[in-house]
Amino acid sequence: MAKPKTKFICQECGFESLRWLGKCPECGTWNSLIEEIERGSGKGSVSHAQGSKPESLVEVQPVHVERLDLGMSELNRVLGGGLVPGTIVLLAGDPGIGKSTLLLQAAAYVAHKAKKVLYISGEESAEQIKLRSSRIGLDDSPILVWAETDLELIVGEINRTQPALVIVDSIQTVYSGELASVPGSVAQTREATAQLMDLAKRGHIPIIIVGHVTKDGNIAGPRVLEHMVDTVLYFEGERHYQYRLLRAMKNRFGSTFELGVFEMRNEGLAEVFNPSQAFLAERPPFSPGSVVSSCMEGSRPILVEIQALVSPSTFGQPRRITTGTDYNRVNLIMAVLEKRAGLSLSNYDAYVNVVGGIKIQEPALDLAIAVAIASSMKNKPCVERLAVMGEVGLTGEIRGIPYIQKRLQEAKKLGFSHCIVPQSNSAANSLSGLEQLEVGTINEALDLALI
């Protein structure tokens, strides 16, 4: 009898080796390679359209698909307008962030529309799901709940019931009896995703799978998992804040720049239709170090509050701490302030925070961060009802930013009367009731912004 073939697979990155290695040469992780037995049945590759032949792209007829409404405009927008039939979505996030609650609310809405929903849980029993649904007021939802981890049984049940939506929570708990590896391993996770993907494409059934994340915030398991699915969503947010953010990191049927904002409440997740108003609700008036700016998340402009605290350092090395924005970007802006604006910051600690737990990487917040730091150091508040936006260059110039008209309209809608913008954006149409203060250098912006 032939000896079964074995290989060693890294549990962090999916690197494959014919022999065991103490350190993965791909990701550098120690003791991450485990032995896997190769399956010889030849079922590893799947085909979604057997018997099809190549055809010219010109002759391919476009197909209109009706997306599945999940009952939440924030969730539908991130997905591109709803779920496309036959799509497979990977939802990842930290433990306890609200992934299961979000999916349970979406499943309840679809089920109440007289559509069959199959909720498969490998981490909770049906009784535990019932308790959570009762807590958020969804205990009367006609959802088919099933606590199962066997992949073959799951595929068979989906083929039998033909639901309008399938949710698998989570993919790391599903295993195939045809593989000798343990559940959650690279081989098991990849095989379960491949079979569910094939089932979704053949039966035009949308499937949402939940994925675990590592301590670094990345999706656990092989990197190929993200390439196999159609959409990758990240559900993020600070546990101590009530706001949760849903981002699309990959989407074959929509934009990857959209952002959904939710608020965690006792009765579940509630949509935040006006994030700008929510993030600025508790902003103190005439407070040094507090500046409002506008960031773009997809097609939506959001006003956020930038807070800075600058104080003399009591140690030899001044501290620099940032929350919600890029640490290196803040250091760069402080170097520009010291060189071009004459602010001596080398002996001062600096703390910069984007209020509300939101994380922003957009360069359009550069000028607001610079004004907030200068405001805190000089202990001077900004002009009342002022919004600041612009990118700061190393020579102290203020560079133009995109979507300026949408940013200005959002500022006007929330009652701001003045807005500092780059000179290169002066061609934007003026808005009545909102004065645009055009600046070309960081010194001009500080003179106009601080009282």
Image (tube, rainbow, N blue to C red):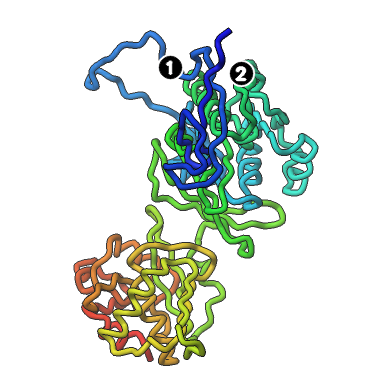
Question: What residue appears at the point 69 percent right and 32 percent down from the top-left corner?
Answer: 143
Q: Which mark is residue 243?
A: none
Q: Is residue 44 above or below residue 73?
A: above
Question: What residue appears at the point 45 percent right and 77 percent down from the top-left corner?
Answer: 320
Q: Is residue 307 visible?
A: no
Amino acid identity at mark 1: Ser
**Label 2 residue SS:** loop
Where's residue 444, x and y in %?
Answer: 25, 85
Q: Is residue 40 above or below residue 295?
A: above
Give the labeled residue for mark 1: 47
Question: What residue appears at the point 47 percent right and 50 percent down from the top-left corner?
Answer: 247
Question: What residue appears at the point 44 percent right and 67 percent down from the top-left corner?
Answer: 325
Give the labeled residue for mark 2: 178
Query: Horizontal placement of 204 versus 94: left or right?
Result: left
Where's residue 297, x and y in %?
Answer: 40, 56
First reached walking from the N terminus: tag 2 or tag 1 = 1
Amino acid identity at mark 2: Glu
Where's residue 295, x and y in %?
Answer: 39, 64
Query: Horizontal placement of 34 versus 266: left or right?
Result: left
Q: Residue 179 falls in which quadrant of the image?
A: top right
